[in-house]
Amino acid sequence: METATEKLKFLLCSDGHAQAENAVRFVAPIAAASGAEVTLLGIIEAAGEEAPLLKALERAAEILRDAGITPELATRKGEPVEEIRQVTAGATYDLVVIGAESRRGGGPSWMTERAYGIIKLIEPPVLAVIGERPALRKIALCSGGKRYIDNAVKLIGRMAGGSGIAVTLVHVMALPPAMYADMIRQEEDVQRLLDSPSDLGRNLLREKKALEAKGFQTEVRLRHGLVVRELFEEFRLGVYDMVVVGSPRAAGPLGSIMGDVTSEVVNGAECPVLVVPGEKPRETGFLSRILGLG
């Protein structure tokens, strides 16, 4: 059971490339503010990469030391996704940080297959740092109105609470019937929803209060329409430094499956994305009983 005195544990993963260093620069002040213990993991994938990687790790360690953090350094040899999976399976980390680059074609950007594989495969939350951000000042937290986002609220509260960061809880609702479209007013919708006894209103209000209790400047924004399209329009207009999404888990031996909306956000965002899995539900169905997992 977590206690108030337990420190956060971050695993910062580096392949020696520039984006990995950008990830360290972004997360260093977050780790320092939260008093996190940091392990800096370098992965040597091919022969001849050891010397450049060690130099990159030393640069990353210096960035962390300048922020007041003394990191533990570790190296492994092998395929990065599998090595990170093994490291996170053998120790408890509250956050895994990776540098991620987007591949761009004629349409939206798509995260590299390796970074996406890490997010899908490992158990801990993953912060994929895309691009460069000088500081964390404004967060968009995508709320589906369900409790699987609770873990994300708790984690960012521990990571950045009390620092005056602004958090916007974003929820997308279905379009109203056309005959009522002119009656929709966002501010009125928000207050009416938060005051309502509905599950959605209670969940959003609970999330808002939890974030405010941690010192965040918090607002709720409702949008109406197709979920992914409206989220990306909010990200564009809001100019956020980080997007936070929850990932609902599937029960049973087949593991977790990232939700469609979460996958779209991860693949299309142009700023750091934090993916926080929800609680794993207990499997009590037919397959579980056959395998003796019930």
Image (spheres, grey):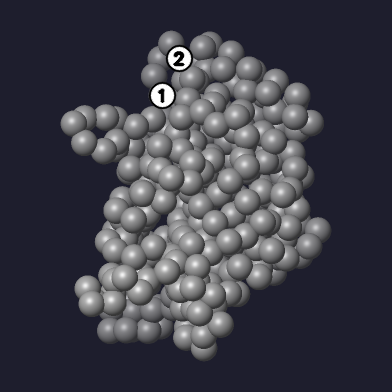
Q: Quadrant of residue 253?
A: bottom left
Residue occupied by mark 2: 49
Q: Which residue is mark 1?
A: 45
253 w.r.t. 159: above or below? below
**How many numbered badges does the structure rendering display?**
2
Residue 119: image location, x then y, percent: 41, 47
Residue at the farthest front position: 182
**Residue 218: quarter of image:** bottom right
The residue positioned farthest toward the left in the image shown = 106
Q: Residue at x 36, y 49 (%)?
A: 233
Identify the residue shown where x is 27% and y is 29%: 104
**Is residue 275 found left or right of 151 in the rendered image?**
left
Contact between marks 1 and 2 (CB within 8 A): the answer is yes
Amino acid found under the numbered disc labelled 2: Glu
Residue neighbourhood size for the residue with mark 1, other residues' Cα within 10 Å, grouped as few (<14), some (14–19), many (≥20): some
**Residue 21 sits in quarter:** top right
Locate residue 111 relative to residue 234 in the image: left or right. Answer: left
C-alpha distance separating marks 1 and 2: 7 Å
Q: Quadrant of the C terminus?
A: bottom left
The furthest residue to the bottom: 197
User: Closest to the observer: 164 or 180?
Assistant: 180
Left or right: residue 209 versus residue 197 is right
Q: Which residue is at 74% across, 39% downward?
A: 32
Q: Secondary structure at mark 1?
A: loop
Along the horizontal axis of the image, is 203 left or right of 111?
right
The picture places residue 37, in percent across and down from the top left corner, at 72, 42
Is residue 40 among what the camera can see? yes
Instruction: Give how far across and how far down residue 111 sits, in percent.
Output: 33, 37
**Residue type, mark 1 in image:** Glu
Residue at image coords 69%, 36%: 29
Residue 271 sits above or below residue 24 on the image: below
In this view, the residue in front, 281 or 63, is 63
